[in-house]
Amino acid sequence: PNATPTGTVPFLDGATTIGTGTLDASGKATMSISSLVVGTHPITAQYGGDTNFGAVTSAPVSQVVNAVAALVGVTSSVNPSDFGQSIIFTATVTGSGATPTGTVVVTDGATSLGTITLANGSGTLTTATLTGGSHTLLFTYSGDSNYTH
């Protein structure tokens, strides 16, 4: 017919409504979302109908959300330091979405210095066990459900 569907279209991830779009003059509804977690999501659109058109649900579209790489930044409370002096290392993990969680393992070659547990994307490790000389420390992020290491 010479009519265009009107109204709104809820978008669902499985059985959960994740947003609603309003039909435009061409009968198209859109919505944007950035909060889908890592995994595969069966997205459907449900049109409830109007006086000219009946209700219909779309076939699902499998939306795949991949984990992204996180960035680890590290600061030292004192550098250079003296033998036996306490040093506080702060690791900050950032990403392009949710705040990263998990741990950062700190090693000096084959020697473990400890593990930093992240709170709000950062955490600290205090050590006074470094021997004299230069050290190349490795800070390894464990990753979480949204971020790879």
Image: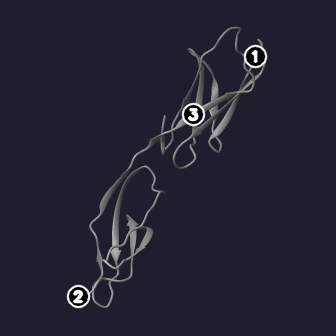
- Whether 13 is drawn above or below 95: the answer is below
Q: Earlier in the sequence, mark 2 or mark 3?
A: 2
Q: CA distance from mark 2 to mark 3?
A: 58 Å
- The alpha-carbon separation of the residues under discs 2 and 1 comes to 79 Å
Residue at 32% x, 84% y is: 49
Q: Which residue corresponds to the image point at 34% horizontal and 79% vertical from the top-left?
A: 25
Which residue appears farthest toward the top when viewing the image? 133
The x and y percentages for residue 33 are 45, 61
Which residue in the protein does label 2 denote?
2
Q: Nearer the viewer, mark 2 or mark 1?
A: 2
Q: Secondary structure at mark 1?
A: loop
Disc 1 marks which residue? 81
The image shows residue 61 at horizontal and vertical percentages of 30, 60
Q: The disc labelled 1 sits on which kind of residue?
A: Ser
First-in-chain label (1 vs 3): 3
Instruction: State the separation of the CA atoms marked 1 and 3.
Output: 22 Å
Amino acid on which the number 3 mark rests in the picture: Val
Of 68 and 59, which appears nearest the observer? 68
Image quadrant where one finds the N terminus: bottom left
Residue 15 visible? no
- The 10 Å Cα crowd at callout 2, few under 14, some 14 to 19, many 20 or more, is few
Answer above or below: position of 44 versus 41.
Answer: below
Looking at the rendering, which quadrant does residue 20 occupy?
A: bottom left
Q: What kind of element bears circle 2?
A: loop
* 28 vs 51: above or below: above
Looking at the picture, which amino acid does disc 2 mark? Asn
Looking at the rendered structure, which numbered label has been put on residue 72? 3
Q: N-terminal of the two: label 2 or label 1? A: 2
Q: Is residue 36 left or right of residue 3?
A: right
The local secondary structure at tag 3 comes to strand
